[in-house]
Amino acid sequence: MIGALLASCLDRNIAIRVGARVRRLVVENDAVVRVTVHSHDDDVAP
């Protein structure tokens, strides 16, 4: 019983940590995409 509780707590901590890392990666990729899109818009502008 205690082992199961510990396992669920560890799983939750790992999930939170992985989720935070994924969110950070998504935010960084989103910023990169925005910058590249803006630079392309500047290139297209006359």
Image: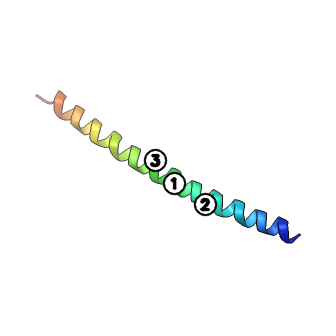
Q: Residues within 10 Å of mark 2 (few under 14, many from 20)?
A: few
Whether residue 42 is situated above or below residue 14 in the rendered picture: above
Q: Which disc, if any, is residue 37?
A: none
Q: Secondary structure at mark 1?
A: helix
**Residue at image coords 29%, 36%:** 37
Say which amino acid is labelled 1. Arg
| Quadrant location of the C terminus in the rendered image | top left
Label 2 and label 1: CA atoms lie apart by: 9 Å
Label 3 and label 1: CA atoms lie apart by: 9 Å
Q: Is residue 29 left or right of 36 when viewed as pictured?
A: right
The residue pinned by badge 3 equals 26
Q: Could you say where residue 8 lies in the image, as x and y percent from the top left?
A: 76, 63
Image quarter of residue 9: bottom right
Q: Secondary structure at mark 2?
A: helix
Colour pattern of the rendering? rainbow
Q: Which disc, if any, is residue 21?
A: 1
Q: Could you say where residue 12 lies in the image, as x and y percent from the top left?
A: 68, 62
